[in-house]
Image: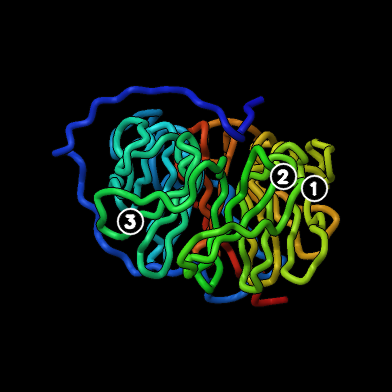
Amino acid sequence: MLRKGFYYCLFFFVVNVSDIPPATASTLTLSSRLESDICLTATWATQGITVAGGKGFGNGFDQLADPYGIFLDDNDTIYIADRSNHRIIMWEQNATIGQLVAGEAWESTRSMSLNMPQDVVVDKNGTMYISDGGNRRVVRWRRDAEEGEVIIDHIQAVGIGQDDEGSIYVSEYADGRITKWNMNDDELNGQVIATQLRQSNFLFVDQNRSVYSVGYMAHRIVKVSEDAEEPIIVAGQSDKSGRDLDQLAFPTGVFVDQLGTIYVADTDNHRIVRWPRGATSGNLIIGEHGVGSESDQLHNPSDLFLDRYGNLYVTDTLNNRVQKFMIDKSSCLTN
């Protein structure tokens, strides 16, 4: 069983910088905005399409190495925290090769380098915010910049999100808490909005600024509302892992649609499950055929994202690829 919080393996690659393709600009927004609601009877294709990587563990620009966090912009351009390559790589739709947009080919503390990046979010101006896990910092990397700037230091950041006002939310894995950082402040000071989260992994910020946090070691998803005194469990059972549909096993990623339906990367169960708002159990949408590398299988999925149409993108970490599962909304028209 792979523990998905923080682990460090060193890989050394040599890359000719002249082979690095330049990044091109895209129109970006704070988060994916679905064009229509996803009804509860919608389904997804069981066969995934590889849209990034899938050519083995490696540092080529058609490869990934231990991909982790993922973000999509309004053009469905994919940003991937390519963790063991110490870089953020961008894949445009239908591209056969990615483009380097942050980091180098080796880990370092330098401002143009990253060390085991965990997650990335991109704002409406094209600025990336990166949880640079191995360097214990959060880096802001402006569009077309050659290097980033450290905005939060001495922090074991994993998940990172942003609300509609531009504030950054960071999950601090070891401390089991979430902090909020107002990017408009002259001097950044984090506001603790939730504690005792048991190895908080990725998070999601919805349109109401409620934060959904993945409790990796607690096998649950909790919701932290702005007006609530305590987080509430919205998926999984606290401190109880398992394969039943009311259970999770070392989950890492979460996404919430406009109806409040929760999508979870149930990592050690090698599946994606969907929990309607208020439900006491989920339903399986990807991963029926168990762990593996076939198109209908996953191996330790880490993160997920829905595009504006509702298609599902999954970082299939130990298969070193990103898979796309097409949505089928035909049942929504008859319900």
> Seen in the image, is 53 located left or right of residue 247?
left
* Residue 308 at least partly seen: no
CA gap between label 3 and label 2 equals: 31 Å
Q: Quadrant of residue 18?
A: top left
Please say if 181 is above or below 298. below
Residue at the front extreme of this rendering: 187
**Crowding near the residue tagged with mark 1, few <14, some 14–19, many ≥20 C-alpha atoms within 10 Å:** many
For residue 92, which numbered disc appears in the image? 3
Q: Identity of the amino acid at label 3?
A: Glu
Which one is nearer the viewer's eye here, 148 or 120? 148
Q: Which residue is rendered at x = 67% and y = 45% of the image?
A: 200
For residue 215, which numbered disc appears in the image? 2
Q: Which residue is mark 1?
A: 236
CA gap between label 3 and label 1 equals: 34 Å
* Disc on the earlier residue, 3 or 2: 3
Which of the image's four quarters has the N terminus? top right
> Seen in the image, is 133 located left or right of residue 59?
right
Q: Are marks 1 and 2 in contact (CB under 8 Å)?
A: yes
CA gap between label 1 and label 2 equals: 10 Å
Q: Quadrant of residue 244?
A: top right
* Disc on the earlier residue, 1 or 2: 2
**Crowding near the residue tagged with mark 3, few <14, some 14–19, many ≥20 C-alpha atoms within 10 Å:** many
Q: Which residue is rendered at x = 41% and y = 62% of the image?
A: 76
Closer to viewer: mark 3 or mark 2: 2
Closer to viewer: mark 1 or mark 2: 2
Which one is nearer the viewer's eye here, 288 or 91? 91
Which one is nearer the viewer's eye here, 108 or 272? 108
Q: Which residue is rendered at x = 42% and y = 31% of the image?
A: 84
